[in-house]
Amino acid sequence: MEVYSIGGFSEVGKNMVVVKINDDAFIFDAGLYIPAVIELQEENIKDYGERHLRAKEALPDDLILDKLGIRNKIRAIFLSHAHLDHLGAVPHIAHRYNAPIIGSPYTMAVLKKILDDEKKKISNKLVTINVNSSYVLKTKTSSYAVELIHMTHSVPHTTMIALHTPEGVVVYGNDFKIDNTPVLGLTPNYTALKKISKEGIKVAILDSLYCHSETKTPSESVARNMVRDVFSGLHGTKSAIFVSTFSSHIARLKSIIDFGKKLDREIIFMGRSLNRYVSAANEINVVNFKNDVRTVTYRNQVASMLKKIEGNRGKYLVVCTGHQGEPGSILERLSMKKLHFQFRKDDNLVFSSKTIPVPVNIKNKDEMDKRFKKFGVRIFDEVHVSGHGGREDIRNLIEFLSPEHVIPSHGSYQRLLPMVELGKELGYEKGKNFHLLHNGQKLVI
Ligand SMILES: [Zn+2]
């Protein structure tokens, strides 16, 4: 078995792994490097083609597969979940492969929205399989069952992909945290995990982004309480309340709606990416926000809604894009006084998010915060818990699965280094059955 670390091993983003067994190869995820395209998030991403995105190093370097003679051996593209750093490259590179794209219902619904939004057409067959079910792929020489095992993270229908091969099970768990009291959806499927562990896991590729955090990441129900707590302190205010969170974080949006309703304000969702993820969730009945929320998407709708809010700021709760200070996002434009709403003293701004620790985001968010503070806005920062497991989540999972080989993923070499210590504690040896990789490496197991 050969494992190729194509993307996401030298940075946080553009996740992509290829596993090759004999004459068959499989792609796990194809993500974007978001900091490289941050200015395209809100507007105009359709204007940027594959060549431009490659030049910006926003796509995983899958051209290497041509050089290695693997491109024509790709039999399927598996998607683990609906985050852009895992599926955002699909519209731009899928045409290179004569292979179906396989993912869970929410993941595939989001992919279809992105393809529609960006007016992109790909001819790959799109295969949706329910979480906690499997699909059989037949090739000329073999047959492979792929199982999508439910895992908890920060977007609905996140899955751990288990590919059953003649050489043992390949597990791709990128991303996850272990949450036994999620706000929305199922707990991790321990029965299925136990089953594949008994079958024998050859290699596990695991999200290790937060392995430096020496704890277990709190449950999403903790974040729900944080939202409840902040909102309960805002009862009776006549000032504006704006909230920003990850557009794909449907569980968080549910908490914001549930406690927002108690403030007796009309809830407005504002921004294109919010509309994309929420409408995908509504369509496949992951949630039903339709009666609780008014969504405004296009620039003219946003402008007239904000004018209305300006005159009645005590009547609305606005959820909008821009928690990372992304250029072109609603919050960023509000902070620059580019929209028809002027923040003033005692207005409230809740960030149900954390700044992604890359220089461009830190700079954008800091500068935006400074502008809001000048207006006298009250800022509630980091009303949030992460979707990535800490060291103790990762330990639990490795102990549970007991894979023969472990490959930490989702970060640069430096960022994944703390995993070496954890690996040692669990009886693994670096270079033998525990592998720290850079982008573009080949590992033979
Ligand atoms: Zn993710």
Image (spheres, rainbow, N blue to C red):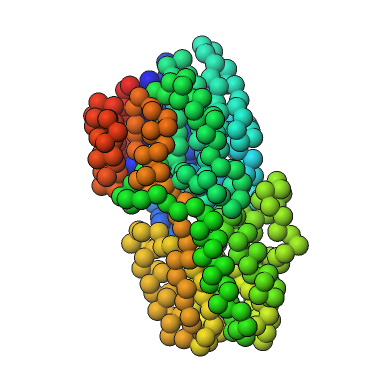
Residue depicted at 54% across the width and 66% down the height: 227
Q: Is residue 67 visible?
A: no
Residue depicted at 42% across the width and 51% down the height: 217
Left or right, 122 with respect to 36, comes to: right
| Residue 361 picture quarter | bottom left
- Measured from the top left, where is residue 286 in percent x and y? 67, 48
- Measured from the top left, where is residue 313 in percent x and y? 64, 83
Query: What number of labels is visible?
Result: 0
Q: Is residue 221 visible?
A: yes
Instruction: Reply above or below: 132 against 361.
Output: above
Instruction: Reply above or below: 105 against 265.
Output: above
Quadrant where the C terminus is found in the figure: top left
Quadrant where the N terminus is found in the figure: top left
Residue depicted at 24% across the width and 30% down the height: 429
Using the image as rendered, state which of residue 291 and residue 39 is in the foreground: 291
Using the image as rendered, state which of residue 37 and residue 66 is in the foreground: 37
- Measured from the top left, where is residue 248 in percent x and y? 56, 54
- Measured from the top left, where is residue 133 in percent x and y? 61, 30
Left or right, 11 with respect to 184, comes to: left
| Residue 314 picture quarter | bottom right
Spot the residue most to the top: 141
Using the image as rendered, state which of residue 347 and residue 200 is in the foreground: 200
Left or right, 316 with respect to 48, comes to: right
Left or right, 165 with respect to 281, comes to: left
Instruction: Reply above or below: 67 against 264.
Output: above
Spot the residue most to the right: 291
Residue depicted at 60% across the width and 27% down the height: 134
| Residue 276 picture quarter | bottom right
